[in-house]
Image (cartoon, coloured by chain):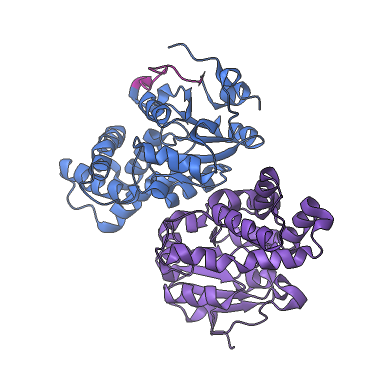
Chain colours: A purple, B blue
Amino acid sequence: MPQRGGAADMAEPIRAVIFDVFGTLVDWRTGIAREVHGRLGRRVADPEAVADAWRALYQPSMEAVRSGQRPYAKLDVLHRESLDRVLADLKLHDVDEPTRRELTLAWHRLDAWPDVKPALLRLRERFRLAPCSNGNIALMADLARRNGLPWDTICGADLARDYKPKPAVYRAAADAFDCRPAEVLMVAAHSSDLAAAEAAGLRTAFVARPQEMAHGRGERHAAQPVDYSAPDLAHLATQLGT
Amino acid sequence: MPQRGGAADMAEPIRAVIFDVFGTLVDWRTGIAREVHGRLGRRVADPEAVADAWRALYQPSMEAVRSGQRPYAKLDVLHRESLDRVLADLKLHDVDEPTRRELTLAWHRLDAWPDVKPALLRLRERFRLAPCSNGNIALMADLARRNGLPWDTICGADLARDYKPKPAVYRAAADAFDCRPAEVLMVAAHSSDLAAAEAAGLRTAFVARPQEMAHGRGERHAAQPVDYSAPDLAHLATQLGT
């Protein structure tokens, strides 16, 4: 899809840049598969399939919160519940409690794509930066420490006590920075996230992460018009004049 | 008052250290007086008295939120309302809107006491760190940038949508770090803040900041038992083994 003219077309300058994290900044699939293999060994034939099965329960688990069916529960809690289902499906009923707990924390130990840290350091010179992820604050703080991500604060689900793509999550991030939604740029590798951010009044930037999914099947292009589109964060930082 | 035995007495290790900010980490009185003088000049005879008058409205302004009389409003909003009252009391009715707006942002431009940054860098090696202030996130983010404060995230009033000393504010900070309250150490120069943190289940550290108040009248000692007590943050960092 064509990208829009970018900042020059816009009335308001961008003051803050916020980021989706799983897939956009960190490689969840390789990291989760590595820890599944490390902790369950040959009991699991295909660790990447386990990562995919676990991630497949991500949206349904949050939907119970978004729909009001259950009160807000942080992603660590949902991840653990989903893991229990995945292990049950694999007939791995005897995986012990400490292993389940450590596997859940594998989401705190993911690696960033190599372009992320240097691009964030450039963007930080001009913009306020925060993750706007469905991951909880402790999870985001651990990823930031591991990967040197220079956040001003951590926005996202824990701050809004609801999950993306609910508009309140994007708006809470803008409000945290004392910004109007149009002064905030949401960066993601997923068109659905950007469509929701745009509906909430934010500006949007697509970054391609085909390697997020098996066989390079992550999105290569935004499915709808966006304000910026880039093959990686380094290019986006350049487009934003940093 | 005597201090308790410190970490050796405690069952649970400290995993996160959170901080009061105004007075404990930054010198609000000198900073506000400087900006009042800079923007209102000789119209104000005693800029420090204006800082004191503004700060005197701090607790009453939050009490309306704490008591449920009004919905949560961030500290920037309360600061602005209080400023309008202070200027009215001084018969400075003609101070224009941009000046009022810039004066309100003076709270975002305060300087840290000189021991703060190096001590936080030491503490960061072992603990998760966050402010737990009644200041809103944007205000805290601006203070962090100005003074190089290495936070993992920003906790406090905006996260809890209520004001200290309500227990929810301290507990929300612990929960953000996936900690039990007893795993979190609250650091403040004000006994009342520490008493509330202790009542919420946190551990407590007093830091003396006599220069916070006119004539060195800030608290020199905690008014009740605390887990740690130090003349500045460097000593506290040492007591905590960093």
List x then y, in percent, for residue B119: 60, 31
Q: Is residue B90 left or right of residue B127?
A: left
Q: Residue furthest top?
A: B2
Q: What secondary structure do most residues of the magenta stretch adopt? A: loop
Task: Name the residue at 75% across, 54% down.
Answer: A35
Above or below — where is A21 with respect to A217? Answer: above
Q: Is residue A27 visible?
A: no
Q: Is residue A118 left or right of residue B193?
A: right
Above or below — where is A196 with respect to B209? Answer: below
Q: Residue furthest right?
A: A42
Q: Residue furthest bottom?
A: A2
- In the figure, residue A30 lies in which quadrant? bottom right
List x then y, in percent, for residue B97: 26, 57
Look at the image and say whether residue A135 sits in the magenta stretch. Answer: no
Task: Name the residue at 27% across, 36% down.
Answer: B59
Task: Name the residue at 48% across, 34% down.
Answer: B25
- In the figure, residue B240 lies in which quadrant? top right
List x then y, in percent, for residue A12: 43, 72
Residue toward you, A205 or A14: A205
Residue toward you, B69 or B42: B69
Residue toward you, A144 or A91: A91
Above or below — where is B2 with respect to A129? Answer: above
Instruction: State which region is magenta.
Output: B215-228
